[in-house]
Image (tube, helix red, strand yellow):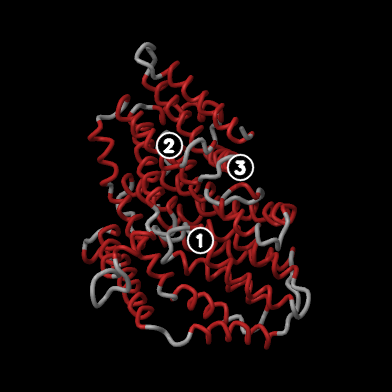
Amino acid sequence: MTAMTKQKKLLFSFSVLLYIMTLSPLVETTEVLRAIACLIIIQVLWIGGVFPLAFSSLLLMLLLSVHFFTYEETLSYFASEIVWLLFSTFILAGAFIESGLASRLSLKLLSLSKGSSRLLVFFSFILMFILSLFIPSNVGKASLVSSVLDSIVKHLQTMGTVERLAKSLFVGLTLIVPISGAIVATGASSTLYAYGLLGDMTEGLDYVSWILYMGPPITVFLLLLFLLFLLVFPPEQIDGAELERVIGDKIHALGHMSRNEWKVLAVLGLTVILWMTGSLHGFSVSLVALFGATLTILPVTGIWQWETAKKKIGWDLLLFFAATLMLSSMLIKTGAVKWFASQLINLLSMDSYFLVVLSLLLVTALLRLFFVNVLGFLTIMLPVTLAIGEAFPTHDPLYLSMGVFLMGIPGFVLITQSPIHLISYEYGYFTKRDLLRLGSGAFVIWLLVVLASIYGYWMVFYS
C-alpha cells in the first residue's frame, strides 16, 4: 500500500468518525455544529483528494439530502441558472478551440509584438485576458497559451539565451491566468460562482457592470505587473526579425481562416454582444450562453455534432460546481455563516472598518496558501464575507465581498497553489524561487490595488 493510499484511508476514516460523532441519529447536536461538521468532512474529501471531486460531490448530495434538505431541494441546484451557464460555456469554449480560432487568435495577438521581447511579454498578458472572454476554464487557457509560448521559446533558444524572457512569459502565465478569469462573469468557474452569489444579493449586477467593476483594477494591476517583470526579469534582446518570422510561419501554417472559424467567430461575437446588451432584450447571461452553444451544433451555423461537443463538457466539474452551490446554501440556511462571521469579527475586534477590511484580505491570502481548489475555498469565504459586511451597515458589503473574491483567486508564491502553477512550472523555464521572488512583489501590488478598489474606485464611482 503506497503512502498516498494510506493518507487517503486515514482522511476517509477521520471523515467517517466525524460523521458518527456529529451527524449520526444517535447524537444530539446543534444545527450549526452539524453544518460545520459537514463542511469539514467535504473539505477533507475535496482537499485531500480521497475520492475524485465528482464522487465526493455525490457523497455531499447524500449528506445534504439526509440531514439538511429534502432530496428534491438538493436536486434543484442542478437546475440552477449558473450551472447551465457553466455547461454552455464549456461548449462555446470547446468550439472556439476545436475550430482552430483560439490558436490563430493567440498567434495573431503575439505577432503584434513586432519582434520586441518586451512587447512579447506584454501581449502574452493581453492574450490571457482576451481568451477569458471565450474560455471559462483557467486550466484550458493555461494549457493553450503555454503550448504556444513553449514553441516560440524553444525556437528562440536555438539562436541565443532567452532565460529571463522565458521566466517572464511563464511566471506571467502563472499569475495572470487566474486573475484574467475574473474580468468577465464567464471567465472561470470561480467567477461564475461569485457572479451568481453576489448577483442574487445585489440589484443590477449584470455582465457589463461586472466588467466595469473588475476591469479597471485588473488593468492597473496588469500594467504594474508588467513593469515589475521588466525590473526583476528584464528580457534579453533578441533577433526581432527572426521572432516575427517564427510567429508568421506558425500563422501561415494554419492557412486561411476556415469556414468553421468564421462560424465560431460569428457565434461568439453574437453571444458576447447579447451578453453586453442584456438590459435591452432582457435575456439572462445563462440563456444567451445556451443559445450560443446550441448554434455551434445546429445545421448551417454549427461546426460539430453533439457526440463530439459533449466530450468537451466537464461533467465532473459540473457536479462539483452544483455541490458548491448546495454547500453555500446549507451554510447560510443553518446559520453557520453568521456564526463564522461573528467569530471572525470577535477575533478581529477592531473598531476601524479599514483594519477589518485589511485583516480579512490578509486572512484570505493566508488561507489561500493551503487551498488548491479556488472554487471550494470561495464557497466558504464569500458567504462569510457577505455576513461580515452586513455587520457594518454604513458600508456596502458588495465591495468587501468583491475584494475578498479578488484576493482569493490568485496564488502568488507557491507552485502547489493551483493546477495552473503546475502546468507552467512543468515546462522548466522558472524555479520555485523565481515564483517566490516575483510573486511576493506581485502580491503587495495586488493587495494595494484591491484596497484602492474598495476605498477608491468602487466607493467613489458606485456609492
Say which quarter of the image contains residue 107.
bottom right
Q: Of callouts 3 and 2, which one flags the residue occurring earlier in the amino acid sequence?
A: 2
Instruction: State the quadrant of the N terminus.
Output: top right
Identify residue type, mark 3. Leu
Image location of residue 142, percent across then percent down? 54, 62
Q: Of callouts 1 and 2, which one flags the residue occurring earlier in the amino acid sequence?
A: 2
Q: Which residue is mark 2?
A: 56
Please state which of the two labelled residues, at mark 3 or mark 2, is closer to the viewer.
2
Label 3, secondary structure: give it. Answer: loop
Real-space Cα separation, disc 3 to disc 2, in angstroms = 22 Å
Image location of residue 217, percent across then percent down? 52, 59
Real-space Cα separation, disc 1 to disc 2, in angstroms = 29 Å
Q: Which residue is mark 1?
A: 180
Looking at the image, which is closer to me, 365 or 309? 309
Say which quarter of the image contains residue 299.
bottom left
Identify residue type, mark 2. Ser
Identify the residue shown where x is 43% and y is 37%.
56
Asked if 205 appears above or below 278 in the picture, the reply is above
